[in-house]
Amino acid sequence: MKNCLCLSIMCASASTKEKHGKYANCDGTITYAEFLRDIEDITRISNEIFDSWQLKHVTQNDGIENWYLTKSETKFIQLEDKSNPLSCSFVYHVVYHPSYQVPCLGFNVYRPDGSSILLNDVWNYFIRTNSDLADKPLTEILTEMDHPVLFTPAFMLHPCRTSELLVSLPQSSNKVVSFLSAMAPTIGLNFESAYDTKQQKEGDVIELCQVSDIRAGGLPKDQKLTDKLMNRHSEGLDEKSLTICSGTDYININYQHIVCPDAATAKANWRSLLIPMIEIVVGFEHNSGWALELTAIILGMNRIS
């Protein structure tokens, strides 16, 4: 008999524990280990979509490594003492704030000669690019403080309200992504929607880069996908959820553990189907170890013309 998983898009209510997901706290704070895991995910997605986030670290005297994200962008700023816009380098940092226990977004702005831009000039630039900031006091949003990792002056978004934002997003699978999606536009930082799309609010994200990765009677081409599904199977799969995506198509699904005899009417190319009506059957078969069979089962589907 073959153990299978019927993956259905029917929604299921999550328990309080599930809503907290992979985070230890429900008060809007995160641990440094959780922060590190989240920024590693961002770096991975950045590489996939050819963005420019980089993971860097500073080693303290006691040998402890403090990791953070950084990204540079060039923007033209109209300074008060200049008639023409000046090409300036914005260097953004995403760091962990140990006192507030939340992610923190900061930046520095440099002229071509390497000198720093004054905060008022930067704020005026933000107001011109984001009219929603016009009526908000600068001191409520930005402050100049020491970088939590580099200990050099930097402009930082106030971290005191970040926990309020994160506590309102209990189902987020990557709270640094949620934080940046909400706050990055405030300071002119382009944070791609792909980061948010690739994060499932509950459960894991399994990425299928090619349609041929799903085919009847065969293993996925990506060994990481095979390993991940096997691990999920061994952990127990009741009342859990994940996202399967292929190209630009994403299916948010919940699944339950069932037993089914065989995968019939298998179809490899499920991208042309009406996605909301599809079920995916993932079969696990013991044969001198674990072998994985991925099959898409079509249930009275209509084709998209």
Image (cartoon, helix red, strand yellow):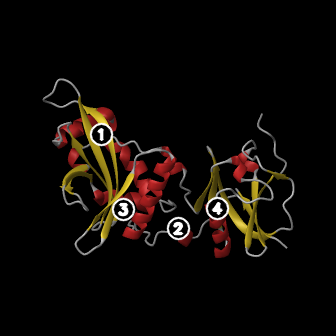
**Mark 4 residue type:** Gln
Query: Under tag 1, what secondary structure?
Result: helix
Looking at the rendered structure, which numbered label has been put on residue 133?
1
Looking at the rendered structure, which numbered label has been put on residue 163?
3
Give coordinates of residue 66: x percent, y percent. 31, 66
**Mark 2 residue type:** Gly
**Mark 1 residue type:** Leu
Looking at the rendered structure, which numbered label has been put on residue 223?
4
Give coordinates of residue 6: x percent, y percent. 75, 63
Disc nearer the start of the sequence (2/3): 2
Cβ–Cβ under 8 Å for marks 4 and 2? no
Badge 2 density bin: few <14, some 14–19, many ≥20, Cα 10 Å? many
Badge 4 density bin: few <14, some 14–19, many ≥20, Cα 10 Å? few
Disc nearer the start of the sequence (2/1): 2
Q: Which residue is mark 2?
A: 21
Badge 1 density bin: few <14, some 14–19, many ≥20, Cα 10 Å? some
Q: How far is mark 4 from mark 1, CA to CA?
A: 47 Å
Whether residue 39 is visible here, answered yes or no, is yes
Instruction: Name the image quarter holding the N terminus.
Output: bottom right
Q: Is residue 166 above or below residue 124?
A: below
Looking at the image, which residue sits at the far top? 83
Badge 3 density bin: few <14, some 14–19, many ≥20, Cα 10 Å? many
Q: Is residue 101 left or right of residue 254?
A: left
Disc nearer the start of the sequence (4/3): 3
Number of on-image labels: 4
Q: Is residue 293 above or below residue 125?
A: below
**Mark 3 residue type:** Ser
Task: Please give the name of the residue rendered at 44% of the width and 60% of the height, measured from the top-left corner.
Answer: 40
Q: How far is mark 4 from mark 3, CA to CA?
A: 37 Å
